[in-house]
Image: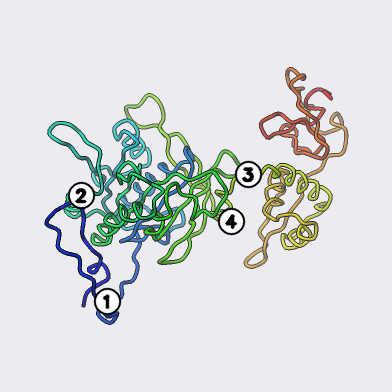
Amino acid sequence: MRTADELFGKEVGNSHDAPKRVVRLVSASTIAPVETEYVLRPYIPRGEATWLEGVTKTGKTMVALDIIARITTGTPFVSGEQIECGNVAIITCEDDPARTLIPRLIAAGADRDRVSFVQASVGNEERQIAFLADLATIEEQLRAANVTLVFVDGTFGVLGVKDATSYTEAYDAMLPFVGMVRRLNAAALIVRHVRKSAGSALDKGIGSVGFGALARSTLAVAMDRDDETRRIFAHAGCNVGPIGVSYAFTIEEAKIDGFAYPVARAAWGERVEISADEAVAPRSVDESGARSEAEEFLLAYLTEPKAASEVQVEAKKRGLNYRTVERAAKRLGVDFKRRGFGGGSLWIPPVRDTEPHSRRDEAPVAPVANETRAGPLSTHGKLCSRCKRIALGHDQGDGTHLCRECVGGAA
């Protein structure tokens, strides 16, 4: 009995000795069912290609290198999911291994003995890897090294397609590579940049949809819309299993031996209730107005602790998007308390100090130097970034506000 993988074609390269194509019918009863295995459940399935997508500088490579480090050391993922120790091969045409990737692998704690870089050369000259030309040799090398994961950074550079927007070219270029991955029962994690326009996280990848058609899983990395100091890792979709939960992460600095300056690496945070579509959605021109409206609603409505379900119902009555209200609550300093299993959360309003600044118990805060820099005064309450009270505030141009007392009385 043959498996589906054995039935997957192995025609690669431009050999003139390739056998004649044959079309036939194959009975489903002769194909053995295969249960999906994972390198990292449920995000990265074995025997399939997984896209890792996001705009430039969001931390895609950092996430990939962190996952690689966990695979090479058998370290569980942030979710607690166990990872089987294995070998990794890296194909890159964007980053210099010695200057960029090796230092970051060290910072991430990878076992470098289990990491290899796929390189090509003609004589003494190094050449760029090309899937269609080098795939047969690549497969031999990966099989000999018993590779668990192939990480590809710089997709279009190694595919060699002339028209990345052509479905036929994209599909034909990816098909042999995916076939190789299936035969090896390895996983492929492939970086792809995305468009900045609106759309589903599954449809934002640059190039033809033919590229995405052959991938069975898609991961998205984006800046957090609520906190610009952190990023979001989300599972956009999967054809062979469930969708994984989303996590926040930051980019931190790590000191490594022999380097005068620190090296960047990913640092995982908490689980977040943010979908991939929400994470990659562009900011709309009306978003600032919607956020201001949401803040005004909360300042008026949230006078005492309220259940999240109550807030959601009231926000819907007023035509407000609940996610926008959640973002506004975080900016205002609302505290979210869990109420036990199945009990939802309780929204607790921040302390409101309506007394004059000079009557507060703590020592007065010194005025901000050069009060002429105070921006426009808000028309509704804002959380002062210095004294932490809610009052009319001056826009500081960086997303924060200072109350009138903290800017020395500037109007």
Q: Secondary structure at mark 3?
A: loop
Picture quarter containing residue 29? bottom left
Residue displayed at 30% across by 35% down: 97
- Where residue 279 appears, as percent x and y from the top left, is 56, 50
Q: Secondary structure at mark 1?
A: strand
> Residue type at mark 1?
Ala
Left/right of residue 270 with respect to residue 60 in the rendered view: right
Residue behind mark 4 = 273
Indicate the quadrant containing the C terminus: top left, top right, bottom left or bottom right: top right
What's the mark number on residue 138? 2
Tell me the CA gap for discs 4 and 1: 38 Å
Going 15% across and 36% down the picture, which residue do you hit? 122
Q: Which is closer to the viewer, label 4 or label 1?
A: 1
Distance from disc 4 to disc 2, alpha carbons, whole Å, reads 40 Å
Instruction: Using the image, tell me which numbered label, if any, was put on residue 401.
Output: none
> In terms of sequence position, does the residue under pointer 1 or pointer 3 come before the other?
1
Secondary structure, mark 4, is loop
Quote the CA–CA distance across marks 2 and 1.
27 Å
| Residue 35 coordinates in the image, percent (x, y) | 33, 71
Residue assigned mark 1:
32
Task: Name the residue type under label 2.
Answer: Ile
How busy is the neighbourhood of tag 2: few (under 14 within 10 Å), some, or many (20 plus)? some
Quick one: label 1, few (<14), some, or many (20+) residues within 10 Å? few
Q: Amino acid at mark 3?
A: Arg
